[in-house]
Image: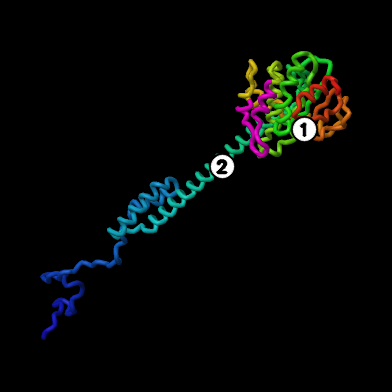
Amino acid sequence: MTERTDVSTGEYPTGDPGDQPGVPTPYKVPSTAYNGPVAPRTNTLAIVALVTGFCCNIAAVITGHIALSQIRRTGEAGKGFAIAGLVLGYASIGLTAIMLVVMVFFTAAMGAFVAAAVGATSSATSSESSSAEPTGQTGAAYFDDGYLLVGTGSTVVDLYIDPMCPFCGQFDIANGDTLAALVDDGSITMRLHPLTFLDHTSQGTEYSTRASAALTCEAAINPESTLDYLAALFANQPAEGTTGLSDDELVALSGGSSSIADCVTGEQYHAWSQQNTDAALAGPIPGAEIASIQGTPTVLIDGSQYDGPIDDPQALADAILGVTS
């Protein structure tokens, strides 16, 4: 086989064959470089979920769930973004719920505190006004002296009673009309001392105090019907151990021309009645031969204690009028 040489030089030709005249250029296959697999696109809603997780919890939760659903279907990237958005969204919702609960409880607590403070102030004001000891004279009530006075007779009869005391009830039923007649004819001045020492027998309602104060209300507002109210108290006397009459029932016993409702329900003379009881039980009793009151009913006739039967009106009248057998 004869090799081709340059006829002018006798050397082998150099260079690309395509550069040689009459020699065709061979086909060149294009070079393609392999750069690895293409990364999937990131789900848009996953990004939105992450961003809104910092500012809008509801939007973050909604878009996060939608993004996860789309990612499972399309294979897109961004699952971590969606989960982060959901975590932020739910955490924000939980924190908001806790804050709302705390705010509700705080508001309720503050409301209760304010109501209690207002109630305490109102109660204290009411207590101060009701516990303030009245002075002077109002109607038939002589507050400084501690009694309710009816009649103008020369003989003074002091009657110490407790509205819950059953013996006081027996005494008034037997002797009430006699005493009222002696008051009306000018024979005696009667001084009523309503006491409260049987409060403990009325199941916590302090009936003795309430009834004594109601009698004082009647004496102060309707002095002309003081003895009528006393008679009504004993005619409707509750048994020991019961709650006694209600305030409304005590008001209804009044036959006076003016209502005693505000006086009774306002507890206007509760403290005064209790103070009189303390003074009577502790003594001394001004102008009396006894040092203190030991029980009810106690009757003093010009300072001397009546020791006769409590159910014999004639015996009592004779003792008052000085009649001796």
Q: Residue 179's quadrant in the figure?
A: top right
Calculate the distance from the C-alpha at mark 1 to the C-alpha at mark 2. Answer: 55 Å
| Residue in the foreground of this view, choosing between 311 and 77 | 311
> In this picture, which residue range is highlighted in magenta?
228-250
Q: Which residue is mark 2?
A: 106
Of mark 1 and mark 2, the one earlier in the sequence is: 2
Residue appearing at x 65%, y 27% in the figure: 235
Residue appearing at x 68%, y 18% in the figure: 225
Residue 38 image point, x, y percent: 29, 62
| Residue in the foreground of this view, choosing between 28 and 197 | 197
Residue appearing at x 81%, y 35% in the figure: 294
Residue appearing at x 75%, y 35% in the figure: 197
| Residue in the foreground of this view, choosing between 136 and 59 | 136
The residue type indicated by label 1 comes to: Thr
Q: Is residue 272 left or right of residue 93?
A: right
Based on the picture, tell me whether residue 234 belongs to the magenta stretch: yes
Q: Is residue 156 left or right of residue 103?
A: right
Instruction: Identify the element where label 2 is drawn.
Output: helix
Q: Is residue 237 left or right of residue 277?
A: left
Based on the picture, tell me whether residue 71 belongs to the magenta stretch: no
Q: Point out which mark residue 296 bears.
A: 1
Q: Point out which mark residue 211 bears.
A: none
Q: Residue 253's quadrant in the figure?
A: top right
Question: Can residue 272 be seen by looking at this rendering?
Answer: no
Mark 1 vs 2: CB contact within 8 A: no
